[in-house]
Image (cartoon, rainbow, N blue to C red):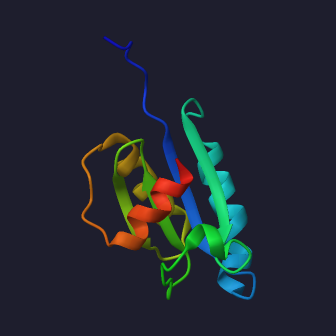
Amino acid sequence: MAPWRPMTVHVACLCAAWCRTCESYQEVFEAACAELPQQDLQVRWIDIEDEAELVGDLDIETFPTLLIADDTHVRFAGPLTPQPQTLRRVLRAHLDDTRPMRVGAGYELLAARLR
């Protein structure tokens, strides 16, 4: 039997360079993620145009959009209001709650590429 190992949690914020909200939100995102326990945590800022191959066919219409996934499934995916307290609340809730969220195939494929 393989030894137990903790799951890696991937937190990705999907934004665009031309988006003024994203421009100011990157600092908020990085600060909120820095407050989290860093062991087994992978944090990524993704510009949907610069990293179009990674994003694939996922159509992001609202910024910022957050993805939280672990080694097996997506825990959260969707747009957020750009307030720091909203981000912190969503991060805390979905880092502790390991239940999968029902999401579209595009989010599942992105999570698989991040793993």
The answer to whether 45 is drawn above or below residue 23 in the figure is above
x and y, in percent, of residue 39 in the image: 57, 29
The answer to whether 82 is drawn above or below residue 43 in the figure is below
Count the numbered circles shown: 0
Residue placed most toward the observer, 68 or 113: 113
Quarter holding the N terminus is top left
**Residue located at (41% from left, 47% from top):** 92
**Residue located at (72% from left, 75% from top):** 24
**Residue located at (66% from left, 82% from top):** 21
x and y, in percent, of residue 90 in the image: 41, 58
x and y, in percent, of residue 41 in the image: 56, 39
User: Along the horizontal axis of the image, is 13 left or right of 24?
Assistant: left
The answer to whether 47 is drawn above or below residue 43 in the figure is below
User: Along the horizontal axis of the image, is 98 left or right of 92?
Assistant: left
Residue placed most toward the observer, 50 or 67: 50
x and y, in percent, of residue 57 in the image: 50, 80
Quadrant of residue 77 within the rendered picture: bottom left
Residue placed most toward the observer, 30 or 99: 99
The answer to whether 96 is drawn above or below residue 60 in the figure is above
